[in-house]
Every structure is written in C-alpha cells, then in structure tokens.
Image (tube, rainbow, N blue to C red):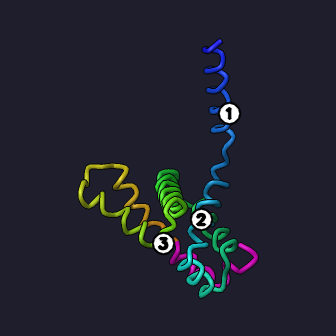
Amino acid sequence: MKRTITIAAAVIVLGACAGSDPKAELRADCTVIAEDEEGQENIAGMGGDPASFCDCMLARIEMLDEATQAKVALTLDTVATRATETGRPVEDIAIELMRPAMVNPDDKTARDLMDGVGLVGRMIDEVEEDFGSGACTKGAA
C-alpha cells in the first residue's frame, strides 16, 4: 500500500512537471522583473508597461538559439525567484549573481548565470531600442 501511494505521488509530480508551460514560466519571471520598482521606471521611460515589455522580451528570447535561451531562462528564473523570496531589488540580485563566477570560474552554473545577466542586460537595451523605433509598442508586441 505504501509503495502504491509513493508511485501515485510520483506520477502526480511528474504530470505537474510535464504540464508546465515554458513560455508561461518565462512570462511570469519577466513580469516579476518588469514590475520591480526600477524596472517600472525604466519601462515607463521606454513608453511601455510590464505587459508590453514582456511581449517584446519574449519575442527576442524566441529568436535566440536553444543554448542561449536556456541561459536567459535560468537567469530570469533565478532573479525572479530571489526577488520574490527576498523582496530585494532586481538589480541588486543580478549583481549578486555575478560574484560566484568571478570567485569560482570553474562553476558552470555560476558562469551561465553571469553570462545570462549580461545577455538579459543587452536584451533589455534591445527592447528599449525596439520601443524607440516603434517595433514594440504599449499594448502590442
């Protein structure tokens, strides 16, 4: 009986994992970052709002190769999770994520996060350019 319960629990957990939507997760992580106080100010300065910013950001992520998408997704997830858990500003968390790779350059996860912070920063700059050129607009991607 105990084994049946354990197997049933494992099936439920695996089903939940298989049912997760990577795009929905990316959007949720982007929204946390976009709704950060400094993020809101920057996005308003672009002429956007968190929803339109994330529309543009997700469109840019889709243009990346799979390995780069994975780094960006890892970074967005890590930053959003820590921001949600701690209530700290996104920028502080991003800076904090770069330190471990500097201290231990052999740590692949730390390197991927540091690379991801740079990638996300460049993508934010590109989204700002997209708002400036009209490629992205408030209310539409």
Q: Looking at the rendered structure, which numbered label has been put on residue 6?
A: none
Do residues under tags 2 and 1 come within 8 Å of each other at their CB atoms? no
Circle 3 is placed at which residue position?
89
Residue at point 75%, 75% (across, down): 140
The alpha-carbon separation of the residues under discs 1 and 3 comes to: 34 Å
Circle 1 is placed at which residue position?
15
Question: Quick one: label 2, few (<14), some, or many (20+) residues within 10 Å?
Answer: many
Residue at point 49%, 54% (across, down): 74
Secondary structure under the numbered disc 1 in the rendered image: helix
Q: Looking at the rendered structure, which numbered label has been put on residue 30?
A: 2
- The numbered mark, 1 or 3, whose residue comes first in the sequence reads 1
Measured as percent of width and height from the top left, residue 80 is found at 53, 61
Amino acid type at circle 1 is: Gly
The relative height of residue 130 versus residue 2 in the rendered view (above or below) is below
Which segment is the magenta one? 124-141
Q: Quadrant of the N terminus?
A: top right
Measured as percent of width and height from the top left, residue 8 is found at 67, 22
